[in-house]
Image (tube, rainbow, N blue to C red):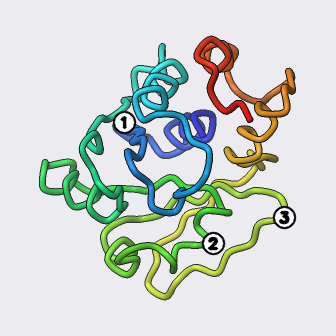
Amino acid sequence: MARAALAKFSECGLRKILFVPAANPPHKAGTAMAPWEDRVRMAELACAGESAFEVSRIEQDANPSYSILTIERLLAGGEGSLEFLIGADAFAEIRTWHRWRDVVRLVDFIVVTRPGFDYDPPPAARVHELTGLDLPVSSSEIRDRIARGEQNLPIPAIVLGYIRDHGLYRS
């Protein structure tokens, strides 16, 4: 997603791109996840060297991590208008989110297209498609491939090294 974020930053002249690792994502309950601190560190490694990228710890104590609560905290903290960068596969599930109508009301969405994933935006959603990247794999597929021991993965080498050094996503 960092590559998508950088492309959108360049295209739209955004002030910054904030990466917010979810502390306790309710949609991921029961799935193999790395501890929150490790996910924050991987985001920091992936974003290193890009002055427009910032990794946030706003969800450090979130339980559970609902996007609407994070959005409300960011807005209350003076972040101003927000654009939510999201993959097409995740956006296709927006209607299952906690208080999804409020999410739709409060942010514009930048939807990164992915081959084979269509979505139907909710009424009133402000959606801007980021096309041309066509990210072929999801994060869950990458985690599955790591668990199988695959070597050639579409993630930064420094992040892959961190995953291996810390024994993350092993089956």
**Could you tell me residue 67's position as x and y percent?**
37, 60
Q: Quadrant of residue 23?
A: top left
The mark lying in front, picked from 2 and 1, is 2
Q: According to the image, label 2 marks what residue? A: 92
Q: Would you call the spot at circle 3 few (<14 residues within 10 Å), some (14-19), or many (20 or more)?
A: few
In this picture, residue 161 sits left or right of residue 76: right
In this picture, residue 13 sits left or right of residue 114: left
**Could you tell me residue 121's position as x and y percent?**
57, 79
Q: According to the image, label 1 marks what residue? A: 16
Q: Which kind of residue does numbered mark 1 sit on? A: Lys
Q: Would you call the spot at circle 2 few (<14 residues within 10 Å), some (14-19), or many (20 or more)?
A: some
Q: Secondary structure at mark 1?
A: loop
Vertical placement of residue 104 versus 150, above or below? below
Q: Residue at x 52, y 24 (%)?
A: 42
| Mark found first going from the N terminus, 2 or 1 | 1
Q: Which kind of residue does numbered mark 3 sit on? A: Gly
Q: Nearer the viewer, residue 1 or 167?
A: 167
Which disc number belongs to residue 116? 3
Alpha carbon distance from label 2 to label 1: 25 Å
Q: Residue at x 31, y 65 (%)?
A: 68
Q: Residue at x 35, y 56 (%)?
A: 65
Q: Which kind of residue does numbered mark 2 sit on? A: Ala
Vertical placement of residue 104 versus 164, above or below? below
Q: Would you call the spot at circle 1 few (<14 residues within 10 Å), some (14-19), or many (20 or more)?
A: some
Which residue appears farthest toward the bottom when viewing the image?
Answer: 123
Q: Nearer the viewer, residue 69 or 126?
A: 69
Vertical placement of residue 64 versus 120, above or below? above
In this picture, residue 17 sits left or right of residue 33: left
Q: Secondary structure at mark 3?
A: loop
**Could you tell me residue 166's position as x and y percent?**
58, 16
